[in-house]
Image (cartoon, rainbow, N blue to C red):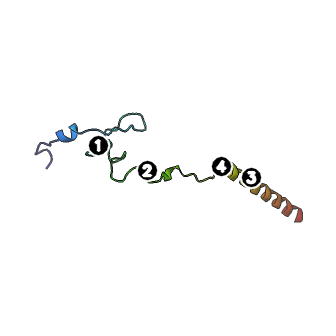
Amino acid sequence: MTGDHARNTAPMQSSLRCGAMTRNGTSCRAPAIKGKQRCRMHGGARRSGAPGGNRNAWKHGLFTRDAIQERKRIDSLLDEAQQLLKEIT
């Protein structure tokens, strides 16, 4: 039973749009959450955003200078062990 009644799309069409930019550089076309500037996907949802204490800025340290040097030392130690095993056998 489609098309029997007229749809009232005016409120949705006239609602504010999300102000976020998409990956391809165009504006997001989704409606903004009531009382907010962004849609539910771009930060309008409750409790959205960065966690408290800026935990997003924490570094794991995998590519720090010290970690890289340590891995190089371990690699050279393993190379020496393999050479020693070759000499023994």
Single out the residue that lies furthest toward the top: 25
- At mark 1, the secondary structure is loop
Image position of 61 (left or right of 44): right
Q: Which mark is residue 72?
A: 3
Q: Residues within 10 Å of mark 2 (few under 14, many from 20)?
A: few
Dot 2: what SS? Answer: loop
User: Which image quarter is the C terminus in?
Assistant: bottom right
State which mark lies toward you, 2 or 3.
2
Q: Which residue is mark 4?
A: 64
Disc 2 versus disc 4: distance between alpha carbons?
24 Å
Could you say which quadrant of the image residue 7 lies in?
top left
Residue drawn 73% across and 51% down? 69
User: Could you tell me how far apart the alpha carbons at marks 1 and 3 are, in whole angstroms?
Assistant: 51 Å
Q: Which badge, 1 or 3, comes first in the chain's sequence?
A: 1
Kind of residue indicated by mark 4: Thr
CA distance for labels 2 and 3:
35 Å
Mark 3 closeness class: few <14, some 14–19, many ≥20 residues within 10 Å: few
Residue that numbered label 2 is attached to: 50
User: What residue is disc 1 on?
Assistant: 32
Label 1–label 3 contact, CB within 8 A = no
Q: Can you give x and y, in whole percent of width and height, for residue 39 in the image?
A: 32, 44
Label located before the other in sequence (3 or 4): 4
**Real-space Cα separation, disc 1 to disc 2, in angstroms:** 19 Å
Q: Is residue 89 above or below residue 39?
A: below
Is label 3 in a helix, a strand or a loop? helix
Q: Nearer the viewer, residue 54 or 61?
A: 54
